[in-house]
Image: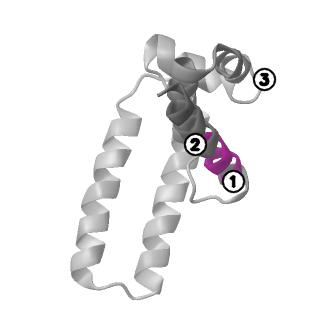
Amino acid sequence: MRILWLILGLISFAIGVIGIFLPLVPTVPLMLLATFFFARSSERLHQWLVTHPRFGPSILDWQERRAISKRAKIAASISIAAAFTISVLIGLKPMLLAIQAITLVGVSIFIWTRPNT
């Protein structure tokens, strides 16, 4: 089972790194997921990720206080608006837009109701 957790952690981490360069791919949630998987498979990788200068602070904020930085909230909101705008511009069907809008509003509410760091 540890091998499965390790593979899932490495996949989550890799997609999270891609998210640094692609604005619509969420980085921090994938790093949180990778942290979860690494905690069950590799103490060394878990420690490395938690103490990483770029990813560690956001991970620790979430683990300790379930908090999200204001900067991350703003970045997430911009990404959410961009994703919905692209969906409108490419002409998705109204039903799909409605489903997407409801989902994105729910995500936004969740993000903005978390404490700030």
Residues tagged 1 and 3 counted as in contact (Cβ below 8 A)? no
Q: Identify which amino acid the numbered label 3 is placed on.
A: Pro
Q: Identify which amino acid the numbered label 2 is placed on.
A: Ser
Q: Quadrant of the C terminus?
A: top right
Mark pair 2, 1: CA separation:
10 Å
Near mark 2 (Cα within 10 A), the count class, few <14, some 14-19 or many ≥20, is many
Q: Which residues are magenta?
A: 12-18
Q: Identify which amino acid the numbered label 1 is placed on.
A: Ile
Residue 81 in the image: above or below residue 33: below
Residue highlighted by disc 2: 12
Q: Nearer the viewer, mark 1 or mark 3?
A: 1
Q: Earlier in the sequence, mark 2 or mark 1?
A: 2
Instruction: Confirm whether residue 61 shows in the render.
Output: yes
Residue name at image x 51 percent, y 38 percent:
29
Residue highlighted by disc 1: 18
Residue highlighted by disc 3: 53
Give x and y (percent) for residue 46: 64, 19
The quadrant where residue 43 appears: top right
Q: Nearer the viewer, mark 2 or mark 1?
A: 2
Residue 30 in the image: above or below residue 32: below
Residue 93 in the image: above or below residue 36: below
Give x and y (percent) for residue 82: 52, 66
**Most common secondary structure along the magenta stretch:** helix
Residue name at image x 24 percent, y 67 percent:
99
Compared across the picture, whether 101 is left or right of 16 comes to left
Q: Earlier in the sequence, mark 1 or mark 3?
A: 1
Residue 8 in the image: above or below residue 92: above
Mark pair 1, 3: CA separation:
18 Å
